[in-house]
Amino acid sequence: MNAGHRGTIFLEDARVLEQKAFDGNQYVIRVAAPKCAARAEPGSFVHISCDPTIPMRRPLSIMRANAREGWVEMLYKVLGHGLHALATRKPGETVSVLGPIGRGFTPHPDKPRALLIGGGVGIPPMIFLAERLRERTDARWKPLVLMGSEIPFPFRTRPSQILVAGMPAGTIACMPMLDEWNIPSRLASRSGFPGCYDGFVTQLADEWLATLGPAELAEVEIFTCGPTPMLEVTAKLARRYGVACQASLEEFMACAVGGCAGCTVLVQTPEGPAMKRVCVDGPVFDAYTVFNAA
């Protein structure tokens, strides 16, 4: 384990509390892991055992964590035999959880217009960050959550009760839980889902950013997670509008604690180019240092 993270990553036998299935082979699993829950931050993840017969763990972003009740919750899409096995785990069973792992997002109070952009399985960290911003009192936070998916969203969508200036006409679908938290959200898809923006979530972000004036843009910081092509487009978008951008990268991980260096990515640092490990040096990086957006 990387020395810088010694004492902050915990191995727990976590009891499955709940497992919910959604369309598109998507699941939300909630497990009792009090040590992980107490330390989890938006952008951090867990390395979870899927089944006693499968030695390799799987990295899953944390979608929510409750330190008081001692649970963490992850959204995942079944791909491969490991996650297929995880989807069969029932409440009361035990899974091994290693976490929380990684450096998360760092919101800055001088940029309270937090634009959260999540694509597919990159949605969970955005929900976690939105919930934490709701709890913070160090600024008048104005988060806006934009989510994109080409398969059904892992929640029942409905028209938002919150008006958002600058939204394209007809873009009214939201995540109900965020609406209940009084955090505006909007959805994008090319699959024709009712109330969703017809296009990529980055195109929706572009249309909204284009309605902001210089003073408003000076208060914007983008936080994003999703497929690498989406992150690249988001970095270009941020550069075009002159706003800060933090991106959570998705990479295959073997050990997930910095030992194998199998998840390295090229990052521009003040000292020059360097290879950084996504698991412990990230997964969140300044998007400009990873994507050389023109």
Image (cartoon, helix red, strand yellow):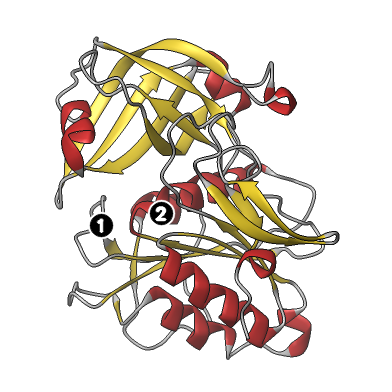
Percent x, y of residue 112: 72, 63
Task: State the image quarter where residue 41 is shown.
Answer: top right
Could one spot residue 67 in this view of the protein?
Answer: no
Asked whether 289 or 9 is in front, the reply is 289
Give the distance between the C-alpha atoms of the residues marked 1 and 2, in whole angstroms: 10 Å
Residue at the (31%, 82%) spot, across then down: 199
Query: Which of the marked residues, 1 or 2, is nearer the chain's N terminus?
Result: 2
Task: State the image quarter where residue 67 is shown.
Answer: top right
Q: Which dot marks residue 153?
A: 1
Kind of residue sitting beneath label 1: Phe
Q: Is residue 70 left or right of residue 77?
A: right
Q: Is residue 245 left or right of residue 71?
A: right
Percent x, y of residue 233: 49, 77
Residues marked 1 and 2 touching at CB (< 8 Å) = yes
Residue at the (63%, 65%) spot, across then down: 287
From the image, tell me which residue sits under label 2: 123
Q: Residues within 10 Å of mark 2 (few under 14, many from 20)?
A: many
Q: Is residue 103 left or right of residue 152?
A: right
Asked whether 247 or 264 is in front, the reply is 264
- Secondary structure under tag 2 reads helix
Q: Is residue 274 left or right of residue 188?
A: right
Asked whether 220 or 82 is in front, the reply is 82
- Secondary structure under tag 1 reads loop
Could one spot residue 93 in this view of the protein?
Answer: yes
Look at the picture and state if 21 lies above or below 268.
above
Kind of residue sitting beneath label 2: Ile
Residue at the (47%, 29%) spot, across then down: 255
